[in-house]
Image (cartoon, grey):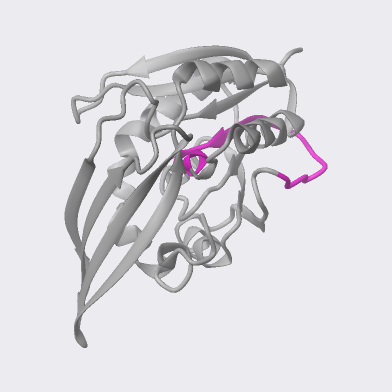
Amino acid sequence: MPAECHLYTDLAHLFRLLTPPEDYVEEAAFWREVLRGRLGPGRHQILELGVGGGHNLSHLTADFDATAVDLSEAMLEQCRRLNPGVELLVGDMRSVRLQRVFDAVLIHDAIGSMTTQADLTAAFVTAATHLRPGGVFITSPDFFLEDFREPAVDTATHSEGETSLTYFEYVWDPDPSDTSVEAVLTYLIRDRAGLRIEHDRLVMGLFPKAIWIHLMTDVGFHVSEQTFPHSSGRPYTLLVGQAPD
C-alpha cells in the first residue's frame, strides 16, 4: 500500500473495525485445509508476506509456527497485538530476503497491491526464494479480471468500546487498458470526541486469471486452483503453487 494510505499509517488502529478478525474464520479454514492437505500433520513453519493486521493469520497460529512481513510498521504493531509470539519483520514482499526457508508462504489480500506484472513476478520470486523444496505457496486476489464488475461497492459498521467505524468502499476501473483499479474509501469515525470523516484512494492490481497462473508457473511453481463455496455466495478461490522438490 502507498505510504499516504491513512489505513496503513495514522488510521491503522482502526483496521480491526474495518475488517474484524472474526470475519476471517470461514476463509482461514480454507487456507488451513489447503495447508494441511499439502503439508500433512505437524506444526509446520509458515511465512506470510504483506500480513497487515494479521487477521487471517490469527486463525492459523494455533496450528502453525508463523513469521510475518509487512511494509507498514503501524500495521505490524496491530498484528503484534493480535498475534503475540509471531516473529514480525518490516519488508517489501517484492524484495525482502530473510535468508531462510519455510514449509509454506502465504500472501493474503495484500497481493492486490501489486499493480503490474513486474510487481507480481517479484512477489512470486520472493515466495519461491523462501520455500523449501516441495514447499507450498498460497495466494488469493480479491478480483480476477474475468469476474470484476464495476462498481464494486461495500459498506459496514463495526464498533468496539466507545469507537464506531462506518466505511464505504467504491472500486472502479478508471482505465480499462491498464492492469489496475482504484478503490475510494470513506471512513466515518465516531467516538467520545464526536464524528470525523477521513478518505483514502488506493490503487490495486487487476489481471486475468491466466496471467496469475502464467507468472507463477514461470517462477517455477506447479499451479492449481482450489475453489470453496463461500457464505457470501461468491466462490472463494485460492491459487496454490507447489515448489519443485
Task: Tell me the residue at 25%/49% (across/down).
Answer: 170
Q: Position of residue 16 (x, y in %)?
A: 34, 59
The front one of 120 and 98 is 120
**Residue 134 seen in this snapshot:** no
Tell me: residue 85, above or below residue 131.
below
In the picture, measured across the screen, residue 101 lies left or right of residue 82, that is: right
Residue 29: give x, y in percent of width and height: 37, 29
Q: Nearer the viewer, residue 68 or 72?
A: 72
Viewer-side residue, 219 vs 68: 219
Percent position of residue 244, x then y = 74, 13
State which quadrant residue 41 falls in: top right
- Magenta stretch encompasses residue 99: yes
- Residue at the image point whose x is 21% and y is 46% from the top: 154
> Which segment is the magenta one?
95-112
Is residue 9 positioned above or below 61 on the image?
below
Q: Is residue 219 visible?
A: yes
